[in-house]
């Protein structure tokens, strides 16, 4: 079933201990789409400027991403300059030029409005609701956000969260959102706002899934080399939501497979700058990593023995 | 099969955000024994002073810990004063009085020398070797250490590590020991020193097991309340080594069960001050937590779908 994503498409310039790149394709909706397209058909809604070129359009199109919802406006594409040389886990934003993204007013094409699965990537929570108003009874809506909206539009954000089924947040964000210091309690509080499914992204430590049926922990893959963490969370969400849409199911085991697929896809993203870890990926590489992951999880439980006394 | 542990027995005074306790029973060999005794018969070798009372001896004895190797010397028992109010993950040591531990010269009783499983808890690497010299062909020797020995006796430590089969280290220690910045590469380097089994303890993020057959990740349990992390690593090692000794096996699946049992036992330790989370534990509580953990791991993989194109 098809999966609609609304988010940003951007040009990123990134410096990390591994080197740097200039004006490469980025943005939450881009990472999400290039990840999700491995599992489901993706419809992208975003805005770009006049500087967005055919090359980038072709790249997304060649991965099967439906671009009817990609609005092109007068002005420049969203541009971000980030630096990871101090801390690989937290970019320093050197420049953020919203450009056409500042006036983004997501228009959902008629043919997208019945999409059963929807992901509201990190944009203004008021705009996230405007997307929902245009949709016709989706089966599941997922949402991502960031510290900026938690600080500046907390009540709007809570209102939007109360209308969705699934949220993805990283550890810092969920603690900030709930004012808690413990992730388990914080996750329960987010569920109390409305969503039945809460996913806590913990970067190199993996991801936690909370549902009414219990919890599940997917460790992140062990990698020898991390080049650029930009887009890891969006890539993760793409694998998760893509799995849900591809299987057309929100069963517990579908969600768990989604969290695992999200972790696998994110592992490819962080090994390269920008989206190049996703673009050049073939299905054998995904399969191999999935198999490796499954082998590393094999665990045969045994009943606890009787107490031994010396 | 029996399991010999050589380490410290101490009196700890601990302050954490949850409160404080004075002069409670602690030490690496204590936590290890009270954890391992749930899975195997434990023989303890350590030194205490004249202030060690019958109450403490009885407590260990009542858990089936063999105390023939507990030497009592003139002087006071090792005493430690630690504070977690600043950082729950790193104690500030306010006082460390080695007392009789300073002259500790581990004597392995004749009846212990054929113990097939041996754990060298965190003591001087030269003393760890002295223990090994007294043993008769153990099947598996495990070792723990700390940053103090890595800084002050690196060559001695590497020599000792080269003689053992299994090492447990936390993330900071393994990076310091190897000079690496990546845990996967660091673990391979430790295996190059000799041990076939490397376990990286990551506190609230769980533990990684590396063997010649692959790797395994056990997430730590999700806890609503952490009171006192003292002894979590020793408790973990007790569950791991206890499982190996109890099953009398070093098979991959035994090791994985060991890492899981270690994580479960550590979850009880950190919920209470000192060893009280281990002392008052009944087997139903261990079973329930093990079952909860196993449920949270259930994962039914599926082959990757064919690529969807919109």
Image (cartoon, coloured by chain):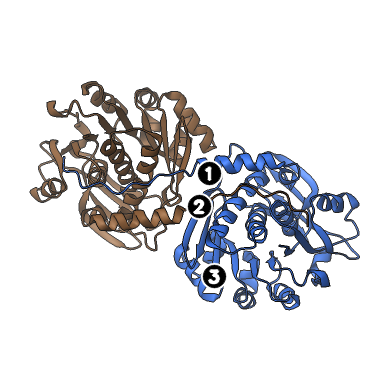
Chain colours: A brown, B blue
Q: Residue B76: percent from the left, percent from the top?
A: 87, 60
Q: Looking at the image, is mark 2 or mark 3 nearer the viewer? A: 2
Please check whether the numbered discs 2 and 1 fall on a single chain: no
Tell me the residue at 70%/68% (across/down). B116
| CA gap, disc 3 and disc 1 | 26 Å
Mark in the foreground, 3 or 1: 1
Q: Earlier in the sequence, mark 3 or mark 1?
A: 3
Give SS at disc 1: helix
State left or right for residue B210 relative to residue B2: left
- Foreground pick, A68 / B176: A68
Q: Disc 2 designates what residue?
A: A299
Q: Which mark is residue B294?
A: 1
Question: Which chain does the residue under circle 1 lie in?
Answer: B
Q: Count neighbours of disc 3 (C-alpha within 10 A) and say few if under 14, some if 14 to 19, many if 20 or more.
A: some
Q: Are marks 3 and 1 in contact (CB under 8 Å)?
A: no
Chain of the residue under the numbered disc 2 shown in the image: A
Estimate how packed mark 1 is, as few (under 14), some (14 to 19) or many (20 or more) residues with alpha carbons within 10 Å: some
Whether residue A272 is visible: yes
The percent position of residue A113, horizontal first and vertical second, equals 18, 26
């Amino acid at each position: 079933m098809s999966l609609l994503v609304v988010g940003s498409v951007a040009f990123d310039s990134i410096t990390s201990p591994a080197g740097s790149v200039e004006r490469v394709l980025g943005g939450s909706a881009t990472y999400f789409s290039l990840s999700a397209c491995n599992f489901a058909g993706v419809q992208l809604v975003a805005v770009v400027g006049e500087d967005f070129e055919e090359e980038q359009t072709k790249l997304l199109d060649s991965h099967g991403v439906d671009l009817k919802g990609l609005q092109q406006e007068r002005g420049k594409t969203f541009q971000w300059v980030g630096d990871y040389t101090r801390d690989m886990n937290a970019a320093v934003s050197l420049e953020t030029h919203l450009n056409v993204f500042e006036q983004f007013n997501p228009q959902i094409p008629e043919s997208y409005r019945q999409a059963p699965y929807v992901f509201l990537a990190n944009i203004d929570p008021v705009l996230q609701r405007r997307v929902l108003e245009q949709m016709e009874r989706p089966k599941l809506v997922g949402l991502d956000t960031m510290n900026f909206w938690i600080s500046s539009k907390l009540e709007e954000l809570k209102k939007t969260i109360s209308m969705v089924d699934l949220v993805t947040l990283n550890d810092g964000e969920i603690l900030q959102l709930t004012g808690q210091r413990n992730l388990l309690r914080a996750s329960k509080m987010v569920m109390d706002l409305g969503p039945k499914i809460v996913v806590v992204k913990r970067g190199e430590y993996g991801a936690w899934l909370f549902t009414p049926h219990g919890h599940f922990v997917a460790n992140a893959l062990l990698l020898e080399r991390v080049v650029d963490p930009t887009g890891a969370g969006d890539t993760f969400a793409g694998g998760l939501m893509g799995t849900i849409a591809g299987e057309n199911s929100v069963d517990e085991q579908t969600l768990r497979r989604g969290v695992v697929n999200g972790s696998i896809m994110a592992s490819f993203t962080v090994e390269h700058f920008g989206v190049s870890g996703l673009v050049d990926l073939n299905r054998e590489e995904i399969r191999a990593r999935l198999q490796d992951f499954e082998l590393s999880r094999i665990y045969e439980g045994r009943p606890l023995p009787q107490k031994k006394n010396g």
